[in-house]
Amino acid sequence: MHVQSLRTGVSRFSTWLPARLVDAVLLAGVVVAASTGFASILAGTASDAWVFWLHGIAGVVLVGALAAKLARVRHRLSGSWNWTVRISVALTVVAVLALATGLAWTLGVVEQVGPFTGLVLHAYVGIALVPIFLVHLYSRFRTPTKQDASRRNALKLSATLVAGAVAWRLTRVLGPARRFTGSTERGSDDGNRFPVTSWVADDPDPVDAADWTLSVTGRVDERLDLDESVVLGDEGPRPSGSRTTSGDAVATSEQRALLDCTSGWYSEHDWRGVQVGDLLDAADADPDADWVRFTSVTGYRWSLPREEAERALLATHVDDARLSHGHGYPLRLVAPGRRGFQWVKWIDSVEVRDRADPAQWVVTLVSGFD
Ligand SMILES: Nc1nc2c(c(=O)[nH]1)N[C@H]1C(S)=C(S)[C@@H](COP(=O)(O)O)O[C@H]1N2
Ligand SMILES: [Mo]
């Protein structure tokens, strides 16, 4: 295409929507992209797929709106670079990076950049964008006026949204196969041969099973301290018939479940271990206590609502193989529908509680830093 006709194309496009509407689209796009980006960290079941759709649609709409905006404001670069202009330039650079990394991940162009997956890089850039965007808004925000609220503009806005949705679908079709979360498949049904990941810095020495016990405490009538002979038979937990300290049976359970890491991969396996509900029964847990917290030997921890926790598994085996150290030997949480970072590894404590544990958010981020 001729440079000249490209230029007229962009400038026509940039005046198609009135300037203030372009700005409104940019504001709405960033708000939607940022909030769905943060929400995606917790979105793990098919019913959460809309979070990723909104995020992707906001992304492609932002590409168009940003192009229109830049065509309109680039002349300011030839004026004096006061601090508002400098903030705008910084914002442009970070926004272009955020959009490029997001698009590159969807299209499968950039899977890994140094130590980061393309998705993690996108997340960091996105997080960096938020404060710069707020400062930019503070310095330049104008509210839309009455004259922008015409039927014609409403139609144009709808057309923008539809075009965004179509373009986003297209990127999904053109890119590699991904789960609705954006993750690609790695090492399913192949025992321990799937990626070993820590959320931030957790990296303990291998746990010596001889020195290890699993305690079940908190709102229970009968505290349990299970040593490895009870929990870790060669084939998994001893089948019904073997006894805990309180005399209750710990049966072996199996579950097929999919681990989906927020860094952009997933892996599906048959897991074997103890069902948490069975452990809580053995400990006579108070039926009114609504939360169960799982804690690693490192202190890393997560809590689940009681009913969900009872269906979860404390796994010793993956596809018939004993869990390797990297995957959480001797015991890890298998929490179907939850994102990978909630599948606590190297567990030595289960606690029945009345409340959730907000501090877990901080602990998962700092666990492993000494
Ligand atoms: N104790 C502990 N458990 C943890 C983590 C961690 O850093 N510490 N990382 C979590 C993250 S981010 C993921 S994706 C899964 C990865 O499990 P894997 O290493 O077996 O693949 O473990 C989770 N469990
Ligand atoms: Mo993860």
Image (cartoon, rainbow, N blue to C red):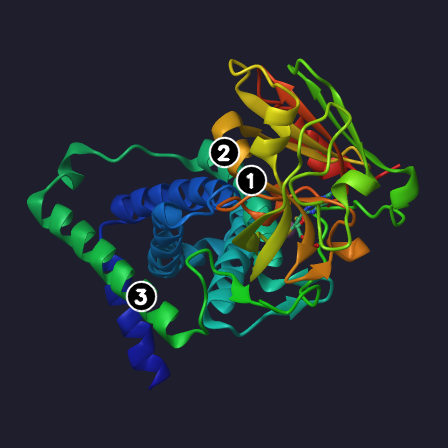
Q: Secondary structure at mark 3?
A: helix
Residue designated by label 1: 312
Residue 160 relative to residue 190: left or right = left
Mark earlier in primary sequence (3, 2): 3
Whether pointer 3 and pointer 2 mark residues with C-beta atoms closer than 8 Å, the reply is no
Q: What's under tag 3, amino acid-wise?
A: Arg
Asked whether 180 or 163 is in front, the reply is 180
Q: Position of residue 25 (x, y in %)?
A: 31, 46
Task: Tell me, for residue 123, which label it has, or none.
Answer: none
Q: Position of residue 288 (x, y in %)?
A: 51, 13
Residue designated by label 2: 308
Whether pointer 2 and pointer 1 mark residues with C-beta atoms closer than 8 Å, the reply is yes
Give the residue drawn at x 34%, y 55%.
Answer: 57
Mark earlier in primary sequence (3, 1): 3
Whether pointer 3 and pointer 1 mark residues with C-beta atoms closer than 8 Å, the reply is no
**Circle nearer the viewer, 3 or 2:** 2
**Circle nearer the viewer, 3 or 1:** 1
The residues tagged by marks 3 and 1 sit, at their Cα atoms, a distance apart of 34 Å
Give the residue drawn at x 53%, y 74%.
Answer: 109
Q: Secondary structure at mark 2?
A: helix
